[in-house]
Amino acid sequence: MIDISLTVNGGRHELSVSPETTLLGLLRNQLGLTGAKLGCDVGDCGACTVIIDGRSVNACLMLAAQADGCSVLTIEGLATREQLHPIQQAFEVHASLQCGFCGPGIILSAKALLDGNPDPSRQDVREGLSGNLCRCTGYAKMIEAVLQAACVMRGETEDVDGKSKAGS
Amino acid sequence: MNSKSIVDEKLHAAVADSTTGLPLLVRSEMLPAVFPVDLLVPDARQQTPAVGQRVIRTDARQHGLGQTPYIDDMVIPGMLYARIKRAGVASARILGIDTREAEAMPGVMAVITGRDIPVNSFGPSLQDQPVLATERVFHAGDGVAAVAAVSEQIAAEALAKIRVEYERLPAVFDPLEALKDDAPKVHPPAGNIYARKVICRGSVEQGFADSKHVFEQQYRTQMVEHVPIEPHAAIALWDANGRVTVYSSLGRITLGRADLARTLRMPINRIRLVGTFVGGNFGGKNEITQEPVLALLARKTGRPVKGVYTRTEEFTASTTRHPFIMDYKTGVDSNGRILARKVRLVLDGGAYCSWSETTLGKAAILSTGPYKIEHVHVEAMAVYTNKTMTGAMRGFGAPQVCFAYESQMDEIASTLDIDPLEIRMRNAFVNGSISPTGQVLHSVVVRESLLNAARRMNWPEVDS
């Protein structure tokens, strides 16, 4: 077993993991964070996407031990109790998710994209989501939602109080 | 108006601008991350405007928060994990299955084979599919044994320790080869054609004789897997009174319950099948797969058992879309008007019937296209091959024939130098047209739809 410590959604965890445990297995089975999904187990579908130190990662391809010392954001850590993240809100308004299985991964890929590029073009969004598969073929509404969320996050539809609307 | 509602109106206004421009009347407050969502629920007998309103999907909130509970997110105390050993050979006689080494592994709680299944056959129209293959393997994705263990890893390791002795048998993979008299029979002694449909109207011979031009072409489509992002998954558990509960992402739970009653040889009222959230179906979760196996493993161990297909199993051991081989012969007059069409469809059914009969029927009825044709002859057949079974998938055969008849329309148009839109306008169904099976059609808007589409794509030949 390997002792690791990592931060998940702002909370510190000291854990013991077997060498073959993936980060996805750690999140789902040891921490009970089932938002990240096992879709293909080979890094093709992106349903397991989480954000590690600001970068989107396929959690099925990363060993838990490799996340030692890292900060992990999962879909469970995106909204606050008071407010959805603008991406989550835009996905809801645009009905971007159908079966929803790919949703957590796609929303986190979108977050990683917008954190690095606040004003993406439609093509930038397509590329940002290119690692995530949706078999209900809902891409068009997702792209609309991400562009809309970017608009909110840039403050172009800012709260009259001048406070940022974003949940993070 | 408080500040929060202003923000939301701005958000919604921007959404409206970027898409349809429709006003958004769903909510006016901010969206806290709570569930259930506050929905617009009309009072009884209250007339509410529906058309032109944007609505929020009731499941959208949980989806976005990652809180939707799919099967693989569910854990029941004491739960075991099942895996199924796949044959890996397309056609073989099973001489023996040795499970002793697997059963002796620490962490392995139970192993079963096809012989443990009370009624080892199922299927929506023909019951030609075994739950686990016993004497004969019909395609490489057939399950031959199943393991329940305390972890998925141990279950997977145990599969490698199950020894199966096969006598390889001749196999057939091409449906046209399978039609031949001397082809290996997939389900002997039955022949390889397991479903057939013929539609006849008028006289195609007369129609071809009257035609100025006759076009003949073969079209083929490929096998397609649904690839739901959520693989097939189920959990089975028993209560102390001998009733089984199965949680499954199955689409047709009533049929699934009947299939469980048959395969487990149990009264249906002792079976509870709970349809859960489905992470994509598309027709691929229309019949039972591993559910009886999980139920039997759960009974044998006295513990809940979960099974989740691997991505490989999704491709090799779940249904797919039928590949079609389609021969089209079409006679037209000098104006490109279709006088006669003869169609022969060969559906590659794979190893089992599944939803082939539905697919065959739809494909045959739709195979001549939305066109007025006096003389029609359609012959369609579904054929066994030693491949992954084919079944339901969006459209049930309609997309395959659409590819063929529309391709041929383009070829006819091109050869006769007629605009592709014009040739369709000349032949399209109108109100009162009769379908190949004799149905008089009403509310037909094929031409209007074509013209609308053509205008939107600035098709040059449209008079606007």
Image (cartoon, rainbow, N blue to C red):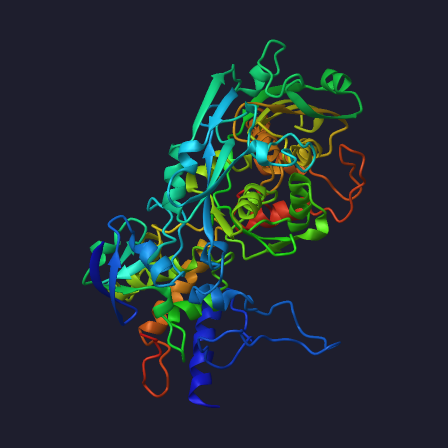
Classify B342 as above or below A126.
Answer: above
- Spot occupied by residue A36 in the image (x, y as percentages of width and height): 38, 58
Classify B238 as above or below B126.
Answer: below
Classify B301 as above or below B130.
Answer: below
| Left or right side of B244 for A59 | left
Q: Nearer the viewer, residue B77 or B232?
A: B77
Total labels: the figure holds 0
Quarter holding residue A113: bottom left
Classify B190 as above or below B395.
Answer: above
- Furthest-bottom residue in view? B1
Q: Is residue B91 visible?
A: no
User: Which residue is drawn at the image coordinates 49% and 57% (left, top)?
Assistant: B70
Q: Nearer the viewer, residue B414 or A80?
A: A80
- Spot occupied by residue A12 in the image (x, y as percentages of width and height): 25, 70
- Furthest-top residue in view? B182
Q: Nearer the viewer, residue B391 or B31?
A: B391
- Spot occupied by residue A32 in the image (x, y as percentages of width and height): 38, 63
Quarter holding residue B300: top right
Q: Is residue B28 visible?
A: yes
- Spot occupied by residue B266 in the image (x, y as percentages of width and height): 69, 45
- Furthest-left residue in view? A69
| Left or right side of B403 for A72 | left
Q: Nearer the viewer, residue B289 or A55?
A: B289
User: Which residue is drawn at the image coordinates 30% and 69% (left, top)?
Assistant: A9
